Image: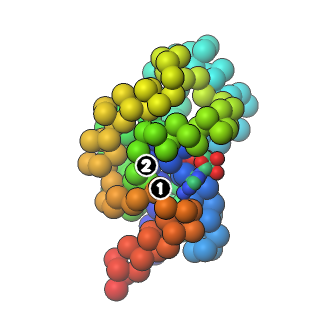
Amino acid sequence: MSLPIYLIGARGCGKTTVGHLLSKTLGYAFHDTDHHLQTSLQCTIAQIVAEEGWESFRMKERDSLIAVTADSSVVATGGGIILRPENCQFMRDNGRVFWLSVEPDELAKRLDAEPENEQRPTLTGRPITEEMSDILKVRSPLYSSTAHHIIDATLPPQEVVDHILQVLSQQRA
Ligand code: ADP
Ligand code: MG
């Protein structure tokens, strides 16, 4: 049996990019909780947050996490998935969790290059580097304690995938 692989980390750390590549290499299905949430509800994350607030979004995000969880799949998660302790426990209990770790400056650079990519409102309206830095101060301990493995995701995507594959093969040995 091949347990689900969960990718966690901040917006822009490469969960979607690396997740696609990894799933192709393994012959696994690829799921993205943000994508699942938006297609199942037929609206954008920005709309859910604007109309129902962050708390409601977080509850729907949890439903998506559970819905996409299956053996032989790679699951890219939303950056804030770790804010609910039950999500952290769920991922740890049901699969292998990898934190794609990237410093705030690099995250900001990536997000600046594609600001509309996530269709998600910024949390504070402040410059993105400052915001990422503050967010990571709070979230890094949560990513760290949730992850079974921490991966340096500043490397090119294929190298990030190779590191994950290396870890998985050590697990299976
Ligand atoms: P996430 O799904 O974690 O928000 P994405 O996979 O959408 O992140 O990547 C965000 C942006 O960063 C995209 O423009 C992507 O091409 C770029 N990117 C992702 N991974 C890397 C990487 N390892 N090195 C350089 N750029 C990357
Ligand atoms: Mg993504």
The secondary structure type at the circle numbered 1 is loop
The answer to whether marks 1 and 2 mark residues whose Cβ atoms lie closer than 8 Å is: yes
Beta carbon at label 1 within 8 Å of ligand 1: yes
Label 2 residue near ligand 1, CB within 8 Å: yes
The residue sitting at 63% across, 60% down in the picture is 20
- Indicate the position of residue 153 as horizontal and vertical percent values: 46, 57
Q: Which of marks 1 and 2 is nearer the N terminus?
A: 2
Residue 110 is drawn in which quadrant?
A: top right
Q: Is residue 66 visible?
A: no
Q: Which residue appears at 61% of the width and 13% of the height? A: 51
The residue under the point 60% across, 28% down is 120
Where residue 60 appears, as percent x and y from the top left, is 53, 31
Comparing 96 with 60, the one in front is 96
Residue 7 horizontal/vertical position (percent): 47, 54
Mark sitting on residue 154: 1
Q: Quadrant of the C terminus?
A: bottom left
Specify the label residue 102 is tagged with.
2
